[in-house]
Image (cartoon, rainbow, N blue to C red):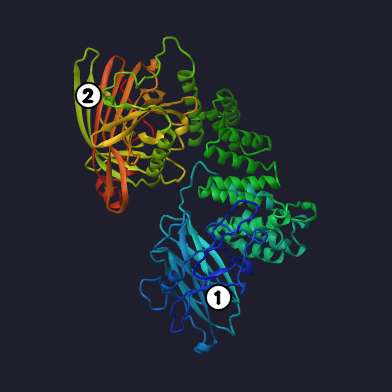
Amino acid sequence: MPGNACIRKTRGGPEVGPPFFFDRTTRDPFFAVLPVVQSDFRGQGLRDAAFLWNNPEGVIMTRRSAVLMILAAVVCLSSTGWAQLPLAGSGGNGGAELSSIGEANSLNPNQNNLKHWIVAGQVKTLDGTPVAGAKIIIQPTYVGEVRVVNTNRDGEFGTAYDLNVDMVKNFSVTLITNKKGYIKGRAYIDFGSSDKPFGIPITLRTPDQDPDLLSQAEFVSALTPRLTKLGPADGLSAKSEKDYSRGVDEFVVRNHPDRSLDEFNKVVARDPDCVASRTMLALAELQSGDWDGANQSFARGLEDTRKLNNRVAGQTIDLASSPGRGRPEPALALAVMESWRHQLERASEFFSEALSYSPNDPLALQEIGRMELLLRDFPTANAYLSKAIAAGASPEARLLHVEALTQLGYIDEAKKEMSVYLDGRDIKSMPLEVRQAWDQMNNKEKIQATYLKEKPKEKKGIDYLHGSFPELTGMVPAADQAQLKALLDAVGKNVEAYFRNFPNTVSLEQIHQEKVSHKGKREGTLDQKFYYLCLAPTLRNVVGFTEYRTIPSGEGGQPRGLEDGYMLTSGFASANLIFHPMYQPDSNFRLLGRQKIAEHDTYVIAFAQRPERARLNGMFKIGAVTMPTFSQGLAWVDASNYQIIRLRTDLLRPLQEVHLERETTEIDFAENHFKSIDGGFWLPKEVKVSVDWDGRNLTNLHDYSDFKLFNVGASEKLGSPREAKQTSKENDASHPPN
């Protein structure tokens, strides 16, 4: 195969790339695609950069012969990349840094009797970002010195061991990878008797886990009880029973997953068809810090299960006649790992496959329900979670079910489910996620009571087209709605890219606040300045920003004046979320016409949220009373690039419960550029918020300037955001005084 071509293998189940996969312990022929390292090492280099294949005749992949391939299973480096990576100890500059511990590398001065084992690879994060400056301790199992190497800026590392072939028949190493801010990685690599080089993938993860997902501890504790006691019916031979029992004792009882690996590897080598023992090995690898080894072991288990079921041929084999096969755990485990990578659709496919082997598996039902919740398919989530509860799933399934029922508007059913979950416990003593579900349920109930029930003398929505709105002067009305869908698609694409690519920023915010009595008398003004920090979420499935304010001295703070009758307002950087493709179905849109705004030729689009299904809402808070708010409004979209340059929002309807008659927000956006980032970002420049509340008129003017990327240097001058008091979440609106 020429060059660096990558082959993706497919079969009847979900596609589970990437292009390269190898067996870290046996290097089975049909798994190996091995890049050669080209580098001079003590004058005895590998001269040609190419790809080596265990099958000398090449590999032709068909749907029949395809094998499972899992993301992050191996490092795919170009031949040029390997050629430019100096090995530790080679004398090259700019490559991996080496520190030696122990005795000399060469055991025999006769260089002709030496075999060269190259230990090289790449360290990446879960999303594939190279990790520079990671320290890797390389510990040979039997012979060879312990070494320490550091990854270069591309996350690459490498070193080579010259060992006497008469004394060393097989070679294996343990790699311990450390990097500040990441969980320690651990991997065992068995080269066997071959000295052919191959890329070793090492995946590091950060300690912060997505609270919306199943945690690793919960996952492992849910799966291990299924696998602790195996026998002949599971494919475990009598010779392997003691080794397996010792492995379980170290892993489950003593909580030493790394010490259990030798025992489990013996069992897998002796009983390669025992899917359950391979799954237990994968769990131990995962707990010991070897993401890639666990990923591979789960993949091999699923491949064996798929082969047995012979899905490609469309045949079904009696699982009872094949011990240890047809288990759902490998597919279930791969699904969970995909969810940790925030590949939710792919995770759902694996969960579905697990359910095809065991339709009533409570964990698979619970977790596919969770995926559908995160994918916003609430009816499907509700169906799966109902089945999970009936199948005996954990109490968390009930909490997830509360969320699904709440999103569907079935508040009475959600209350009953929450009551069963609490079982008499005080909600105030429950963990944060439980209290959030409780608040979400009560908030939805308020929405139904406020917006979805007809009330006498209730004002209708605003008619922007026929009303008196000076900002629409000169607009040419649209003849029809033929362009609306294409416009929404184009605007949605820009908004999605805005939130996906948004960097952490800091700007200067100047706030002018006014309060006017019901008689029109100005009662006071207040001017303040802040550094305004807008931080993108660290979790990829979260859309929106977290906002902080700090005063110029660097200390955290928020606008003053609440106690003097002024209002607090924020959340403007996320105001265009309503046009995000994820949230467009929650609103009604109408193309009003075309209008010239300064130098911009614009489309004018009216919108109104649908409270019965809206997932975004503002909040209006008076003392201890908080009311959800929904919006209608106008967006001016540049006809040349489909960017929103101006936005106006109004209350969908007055909130008589809190005497809120009007809340209007007007935002003008301007394009900002940052030196280290291509393209521009349309950020708020001027904002005006006007509120008619309880007979008083309150106005806040916000002016934003001097946008900069927020980094370590900025945090040292401005004060750490962790010390700043958070003033809002994704969609905070006005907060008037008591």
Of residues 149 and 91, the one drawn nearer to the viewer in this rendering: 91
Residue 301 in sight: yes
Which residue sits furthest top?
A: 456
Q: Residue 47: give x, y in percent of width and height.
A: 47, 80
Q: Which residue is mark 1?
A: 196
Q: Quadrant of residue 648?
A: top left
Q: Which residue is mark 2?
A: 514
Q: Amino acid at mark 1?
A: Lys
Is residue 96 shown above or below 306? Answer: below
Is residue 701 shown above or below 307? Answer: above
Q: Quadrant of residue 362?
A: top right
Q: Residue 674: give x, y in percent of width and height.
A: 28, 50
Residue 729 in sight: no
Quadrant of the snapshot with the N terminus: bottom right
Q: Nearer the viewer, mark 2 or mark 1?
A: 1
- Does 266 sit left or right of 433 as displayed? right
Of residues 190 and 506, the one drawn nearer to the viewer in this rendering: 506
| Mark 1 residue element | loop
Q: Residue 336: give x, y in percent of width and height.
A: 57, 48
Q: Amino acid at mark 2?
A: Glu
* Residue under the point 37% across and 43% down: 498
Mark 2 residue crowding within 10 angstroms, few (<14) / some (14–19) / many (20+): some
